[in-house]
Image (cartoon, rainbow, N blue to C red):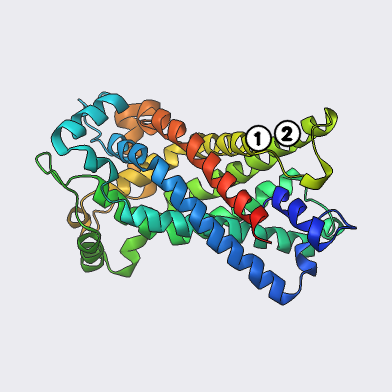
Amino acid sequence: MTETVERKISVSAQPSNGTLSPPTLPQSSQSLEALKDITFGSIAGIIGKTIEYPFDTVKVRLQSQPTALPLRYAGPLDCIRQFLRAEGPSSLYRGVSAPLLGAAIETSSLFFSYRIAQTALRATLYSSHADGPLPLSALVACGAASGAFTSLLLTPIELVKCQMQVPRSAGSRRGASPVAVVAAVYRHHGLGGFWHGQLGTLIRETGGSAAWFGSYEGVSALFRRYDNRLHLARPEDAGALPLWQQMLAGAAAGVSYNFVFYPADTIKSRMQTADVAERVGGARGTFWSVGKALWRGQGVRGLYRGCGITVARAAPSSAFIFAVYEGLRGWVP
């Protein structure tokens, strides 16, 4: 739960305090808040993923190019042109089923665990903030904790997604189906094979979620101070920002999330797009070995390949995620 939402709820729940203190809620209210986090986060995540998925397909293909030069794609536009010509417009949404499920799980898990982390901090290290907002540094820490937890749920889904997005051969027009990918991974590597690339996901989600929530809360706080200074805020809004400010804060969060830890995502994608059968018998590359090979072959440009289109799609996607989540939380009492 973001600080903006806590201010909204506090008007009806605790009008004299001005903010909601999660630890003081009765158990039934805690369960209701958890249900809202999961439901609204899932809806917001699905909407955001639908917006960004075609760009994500381009990103994965750029990231997973062989280390040896020459590269198959000269850049994002060339990548789009090539696979639209070869595979048609539907290829932009190839493998979207797993990511939609993943987006629902990821976003709901992030918001749910973010609220739980705030509750834990208020009950321990920040007991003096039980009836007030946490400092930004604490919110960043809560974001990191929520990302670490979410990475455990997300790695298997992203493994299936990446396998589906990349054709197995140069002449292939289709990636594998979800069932085929799951069966192949389990047959060759067992249950643990679904967490191949976990370290990359952990680094990306922990650092990225800290930046995601931290940027959103920080930019929202700046807007709130700006509105108060110019007397633009209305008492009945209870600290809620106008929609355009929410979306700008969300866009800033999306850019921060994707840019700062992008190399970890590149390495993870390369690990997860490798042919499952080729990783049998101890041939699976580790996070560090894949990263070293990429650095030696392509340098910094290889680590940030596809970053531009990723940041471009992250801004509107994250803007909608926060706007939808905050809107649903404010609309449903």
Other-residue count near label 1 (Cα within 10 Å), few / some / many at <14 / 14–19 / ≥20: some
- Residue at (70% x, 38% y) in the render: 220
Identity of the amino acid at label 1? Gln
For this rendering, which residue is in front, 125 or 306? 306
* Secondary structure under the numbered disc 2 in the rendered image: helix
Tags 1 and 2 touching, CB below 8 Å: yes
Question: What is the x, y in percent for residue 289?
Answer: 34, 44
Give the farthest residue toward the left.
171
Question: What is the x, y in percent for residue 309?
Answer: 39, 30
> On residue 178, which mark appears?
none
Give the farthest residue toward the right.
16
- Residue at (54% x, 62% y) in the render: 39
Q: In this figure, which residue is indicated by the disc labeled 2?
A: 223
Q: In this figure, which residue is indicated by the disc labeled 1?
A: 245
**Spatial distance from mark 1 to mark 2, Cα to Cα?**
7 Å
Residue 166 figure quarter: top left
Question: What is the x, y in percent for residue 223?
Answer: 73, 33
Any part of residue 281 in sight: no
Other-residue count near label 2 (Cα within 10 Å), few / some / many at <14 / 14–19 / ≥20: some
- Residue at (22% x, 27% y) in the render: 81
Identity of the amino acid at label 2? Phe
Question: What is the x, y in percent for residue 158?
Answer: 36, 53
Left or right relative to 276: residue 146: right
Residue 177 figure quarter: bottom left
- Residue at (51% x, 49% y) in the render: 205
Depicted 233 relative to depicted 50: above or below: above
Any part of residue 189 in sight: yes
Left or right relative to 25: residue 204: left
Depicted 157 relative to depicted 63: above or below: below
